[in-house]
Image (cartoon, rainbow, N blue to C red):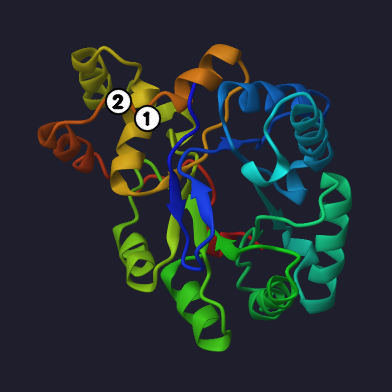
Amino acid sequence: MEPAPKLTLNNGVRMDQIGFGTYKVPAPDTADVVTLALGAGYRHVDTAALYGNEEGVGKALRDFTAGSNVVRDEIFVTTKVWNTDQGYDSTLRAFDASMSRLDLDVLDLYLIHWPCPERGLFVDTYRAMEELYRSGRVRAIGVSNFQPNHLRQLMDATDVVPAVNQVELHPWLQQHELTNLHREHGIRTVAWSPLGRGAVLSDPVITSIAADLGVSPARVILRWHVEQGSIAIPKASSAERIKENLDVFSFELTPEQSSAIAGLDRNQRSGSHPDQVN
């Protein structure tokens, strides 16, 4: 299967529109599962220090590139600094630790995992990331789970506009105010839990569209993300689902189907609200 199309970030770096998420992929299984994804055509892998599987991601990258004609530069890798490592110096240390686990010289994208507003450290954390970016150790920097007020505070205090904001986004949680702000500042929206942790798959509107198109509900939702201009990072463990989640570029939604999905927004989260994570 062909890799997903690439979208250009605000600094010119290009990032695959469908990536492979590794949240809750057990560390012992990570190398095998990520290798399956790379073999299926994924060229974008998302991990985080919190997930405890950076070493497995690194092993998959080494093994896959050693046994194929795909080189490291063709694979986009994202990881994130965890909440307890926020702060200027601790972020630099956390980055070094992640790079050691990933066994990489240069990272493609580094994110603040959560704003943790009560800690009051995300500006200092991002300033450390700006230093990593300027030194060439990371190709792009951004944030995750930032709400509009967090983004505005960050951009007022720092120099580099985040390349992405990775947030919970799916048909039941469409976050229009936030995505409009992203477009205003050239920030790419990356959707975690793009399928609503599976809950949205059984929505009657989604299942009806899937039946009409002759595709799975997951493919309908991921196609909706693509047509919204978002980047999605679904997680899967079976070879069949891994391939299916990437196969969303051979069909399109009709305007009526897109409008029906737009009507599903109910501001319903499957994960935590960013203001409640510290």
Q: Position of residue 67 (x, y in %)?
A: 78, 24
Q: Is residue 241 visible?
A: yes
Query: Which residue is found at the position 39% from the left and 73% from the top?
Result: 185
Q: Is residue 171 visible?
A: no
Badge 2: residue crowd in 10 Å (few <14, some 14–19, many ≥20): some
Say left or right for 93 vs 169. right
Q: Which residue is mark 2?
A: 203
Q: Disc 1 residue type?
A: Val
Q: Vertically, is 250 above or below 172?
A: above
Q: Which residue is mark 1?
A: 200
Say left or right for 29 vs 254. right
Q: Position of residue 263 (x, y in %)?
A: 19, 41
Query: Which residue is found at the position 37% from the left and 27% from the top?
Result: 248
**Disc 2, SS:** loop
Q: Vertically, is 14 above or below 91?
A: above
**Disc 1, SS:** helix
Q: Separation of disc 1 and disc 2 at Cα?
A: 5 Å
Relative depth, front residue between 7 and 264: 7
